[in-house]
Image (spheres, helix red, strand yellow):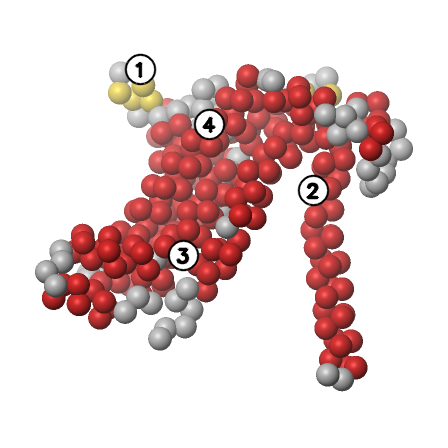
Amino acid sequence: MNRGILSSRLLTFLFWIAMSALTLLPVWWMFLVSVRTRADLFGKPSFLLDLSAMTWENYAAVLSNPTFQKYMTNSLIVATSNAVLVSMLALLAAYAMSRFALAGKDNLFFWVLTNRMAPPAVFLLPLFLMFTGFRIGDWSLFDTRIGLILLYCVFNLPFAFWLLQGIVDAIPRELDEAAYVDGASTFTVLMTVIFPLARPGLAVTGILTWVFAWNEYLFASTLTSVDARTITTGLAEFVTVTGTNWGELAAVAMLTLAPAALVLALVQRHIVAGLTFGAVKG
């Protein structure tokens, strides 16, 4: 291996190290703010961690707060329910579009994707009127977990459908036909043939839709008020007219980041496998 190739690889390695450091710098700064006292925050800023001055009081204050606990529970329930529901519906839709001769299915596929083309803010006013106007007795979709779950399905389902469509198309039809010859029903083929082979794609679909729902702020802040507020909307409560509680705000931000980062770190291998599945048809 000549010196030119080694130099090129070293430059590439250093470039990605620099990009990684630049990407993680805001996270590191947020962590530093979360482990400093209020007095230290207004002192001389530093990117170095002073172990002797570290404090976990911001995290203790946040974790012992019942309001924060409720927000975190709401986020976990909404994001997980949305991911499961979207993955199931998207797999069924992708299977139908791939295996059945549906009239105008190409136009239908494009129409489904158009739901992701407009900015979410465009739908804010009509959705607010729908959530507050749809009532069954004293119950309405406004400020409910089920309302957020269904709403996130509307926006995440097109993405999941698009992602799973290519994955299901890459599964050979001969496997379906062999199962039908053995007397399997359509449901049996879906569960015993399509589902096992599409699991890498389902994993990445569920993970990404979970992260999308977990991080969403605009609709959660507008269509909830007390009972169904999520952790992302709770961040704004630390900004008050009397000032900003930077330490607790940073602690909540780190706790909000932690579940998504942990999930992505644990299943990174499955994400790569799911995104590359079906890229090349055999």
Answer with the quarter of the image where residue 127 lies. Answer: top left
Task: Tell me the CA gap for discs 3 and 4.
Answer: 27 Å
**Mark 3 vs 4, N-terminal side:** 4
The local secondary structure at tag 2 comes to helix
Residue 54, percent from left and from top: 79, 29
The three-letter code of the residue at mark 1 reads: Asp
Residue at position x 53%, y 22% in the image:
69
Residue identified by numbered label 4? 74
Q: Nearer the viewer, mark 2 or mark 1?
A: 2
10 Å crowding of disc 4: few (<14), some (14-19), many (20+): many
| Residue at far bottom of view | 2
Residue highlighted by disc 1: 138
Dot 2 or dot 3: first in sequence order is 2
Nearest to N terminus: mark 1 or mark 4: 4
Drawn side of residue 224 relative to residue 28, left or right: left
Q: Which quadrant of the rendered structure holds the C terminus?
A: bottom left
